[in-house]
Image (cartoon, grey):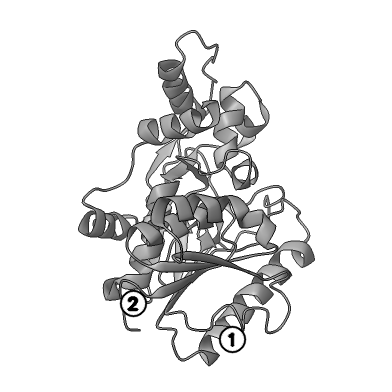
Amino acid sequence: MSTINKGDLVLVTGVNGYIASHVALQLLEAGYHVRGTSRTKQKSDYLVELFEKKFGPGKFEVVEVPDMIHVGAFDEAVKGVAGIAHVASVLTFSNKPAQVITPTVKGALNVLTSASKEPSVKSFVYTSSSTAALLPQPNKELTITEDTWNDATGGLEGRRGDAAAVPGVGRPAELEHGRILDPDGAFSSSTASWVNQAFTGVKDPLQYPPQYFIDVDDTARLHVIGLVDPAANGRRLFGFAAPFNWNDMFRVFREVKPDGKWEDLEGLGRDLSTVPNQAAEDLLRKHYGKGWTGLEESVKANVAAVRA
């Protein structure tokens, strides 16, 4: 596939979501025009206002796609676009395949079908889940390659990894956090909200095991790279910055709020998986001059946004 050029129009599906809104932001900052899809335009009003104020009129627009599982749902949305970042997905913790897998597959096939009929489309990035490659297993040494797929069927209930970027299929870490564009909106349904919950004393997120994290800006930048860099064509980019456990998170919390009461948890262990994340970091350095954002910087940005 040919790369796209600055000034071209790029479609970002589910643009009002936490990751997708950052993908749109990174594209706009890089000089592209963005068309986002949303179930209703009202859900993206805050983005229209934010991006128009930051980039001026005519750079960002929203079209409605009420239900992506309907055949032809994206036919109008793809018209005239040079690239597509398909970030929209089913946000549910249901363990029923018909409520998660079926609509996700239909949505992906529908946007691909629409793209195949639109001659202007040159580049396509699909946002996937880290769990497509593996499930976190503390203290177990696992080696993951670009050809690894998660064949496990047990233990999936109540678990859904966040997405990362790709030029075909991407792999983000399961916990995604960083700066927040809308603390009252999409953030609340993302894994970034786990950080805020843990910071305020909510115990629920602590059930999730040690795993890898990624900053949302890094994820968004990988989407841009997947769209524009021929070196990324057809590759799975693994958006895994580094492993962490909740005690690492608490350490950052204490720096932010020294009088806070976060006691380390015993027996957490570590994610010892070896993942092929070097290619993604190399591309980040190539295009943005830096590699992965560290846990401390990312968590502090996350907490600062919701405390502001």
Q: Amino acid at mark 2?
A: Ile
Instruction: From the viewer's perspective, tell me whether residue 285 is left or right of residue 35.
Output: left
Q: Residue at x 40, y 71 (%)?
A: 167
- CB contact under 8 Å: marks 1 and 2: no
Residue 58 in the image: above or below residue 308? below
Nearer to me, 144 or 17 = 17
Q: Residues within 10 Å of mark 1 (few under 14, many from 20)?
A: some
Q: Residues within 10 Å of mark 2 (few under 14, many from 20)?
A: many
Q: Residue at x 45, y 43 (%)?
A: 213
Residue 281, given in percent of the width and then of the height, sits at 29, 54
Instruction: From the viewer's perspective, tell me whether residue 138 is left or right of residue 297.
Output: right
Disc 1 is placed on an element classified as helix
Nearer to me, 206 or 269 = 206
Question: What residue is pinned by disc 2?
Answer: 4
Mark toward the viewer: 1 or 2: 2
Question: What residue is pinned by disc 1?
Answer: 113
Q: Residue at x 76, y 53 (%)?
A: 94
Q: How many marks?
A: 2
Quote the CA–CA distance across marks 1 and 2. Answer: 20 Å
Residue placed farthest to the top in the image? 259
Q: On residue 139, which mark appears?
A: none
Disc 2 is placed on an element classified as loop
Q: Is residue 162 visible?
A: no
Residue 148 in the image: above or below residue 243? below
Residue 286 in the image: above or below residue 250? below
Can you tell which quarter of the image residue 202 is in?
Answer: top right
Q: Earlier in the sequence, mark 1 or mark 2?
A: 2
Quarter of the image that includes the N terminus: bottom left
Residue 100, given in percent of the width and then of the height, sits at 72, 62
